[in-house]
Image: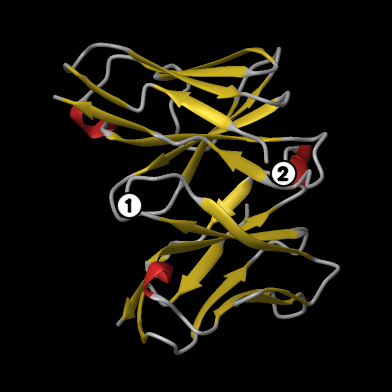
Amino acid sequence: GENVEQHPSTLSVQEGDSAVIKCTYSDSASNYFPWYKQELGKRPQLIIDIRSNVGEKKDQRIAVTLNKTAKHFSLHITETQPEDSAVYFCAASSIRLGNEKLTFGTGTRLTIIP
Amino acid sequence: GAVVSQHPSRVICKSGTSVKIECRSLDFQATTMFWYRQFPKQSLMLMATSNEGSKATYEQGVEKDKFLINHASLTLSTLTVTSAHPEDSSFYICSARDWGGPSSNEQFFGPGTRLTVL
């Protein structure tokens, strides 16, 4: 099955600087890669996603890049703010077996230092 | 966007009892729902895929007789933790995909249920 690795597990960034989180996946059939932000005790919130037919996508301060050949994708947050502090998860969706289940990375705890 | 609700949000029960968690899609029909478990400071682990009108598909290592899933309608899936034990204490989250929506790949998550087994 799919295996998603995520690095780093923790990341501290000065407010205003950029943060980058990287993920790799194993299943070449995966074609959908969402990123979620989760605050303590709450549901994951989709912040951006990318499909395998696109190499990069941007939404204001957030961007995601995808390298299908290398099977890795990254989340970039620019001009970080204290409210960006949370746990971020990447995920990959495999189309095998037709149910398109999500496999999550291990998470990155991002702390923005004021 | 599509809304998924879960009930209850918190439950505390004694060891050996069963607990039922409901997951509802409020404004769309969900033929497929997913159940996840999340231990403290860990990632979401898929437990099973719930299919309306048919048996759930369980992930490897998840006991189907312990975690009973029923998806009797297009808007409701239930997870019953049978004979719960302290090691079952966790955050249980469901999700659903709105196949008819603008982003059919996106999964919409419920708010989660915090289960504590004493």
Q: CA distance from mark 1 to mark 2?
A: 27 Å
Q: Chain of mark 2?
A: A
Q: Could you tell me residue B14's position as x and y percent?
A: 16, 16
Residue at image point 65% right, 75% down: A60
Q: Which residue type carries mark 1?
A: Leu
Q: Identify the residue position indicated by label 2 in the image.
A: A100
Tell me, yes or no, if residue A54 can be seen here. Answer: yes
Direction from residue B65 to residue B84 in the image, left or right? left
Sequence-first disc among 1 and 2: 1
Q: Residue furthest right?
A: A53
Which quarter of the image is occupied by the C terminus of chain B? top left
Dot 1 corresponds to which residue? A40
Say few, some or many: other residues with alpha carbon within 10 Å of mark 2 (under 14 / 14 to 19 / 20 or more).
some
Q: Quadrant of the N terminus of chain B?
A: top right
* Horizontal and vertical percent position of residue A15: 38, 85
Element type at mark 1: loop
Residue at image point 44% right, 16% down: B65
* Camera sees residue A109: no
Q: Residue at x 57, y 19 (%)?
A: B77
The quarter of the picture where residue B98 lies is top right
Q: Is residue A24 above or below residue B46?
A: below
Q: Nearer the viewer, residue A45 or B48?
A: A45
The amino acid pointed to by label 2 is Glu
Q: Residues within 10 Å of mark 1 (few under 14, many from 20)?
A: few
Q: Quadrant of residue B15?
A: top left
Depth-wise, is mark 1 or mark 2 nearer the camera? 1
From the viewer's perspective, tell me whether residue A101 is left or right of residue A105: right
Q: Badge 1 sits on which subunit?
A: A
Q: Position of residue B7 (x, y in %)?
A: 42, 21
Colour mapping used in the image = secondary structure
Indicate whether B86 appears above or below B39.
Answer: above
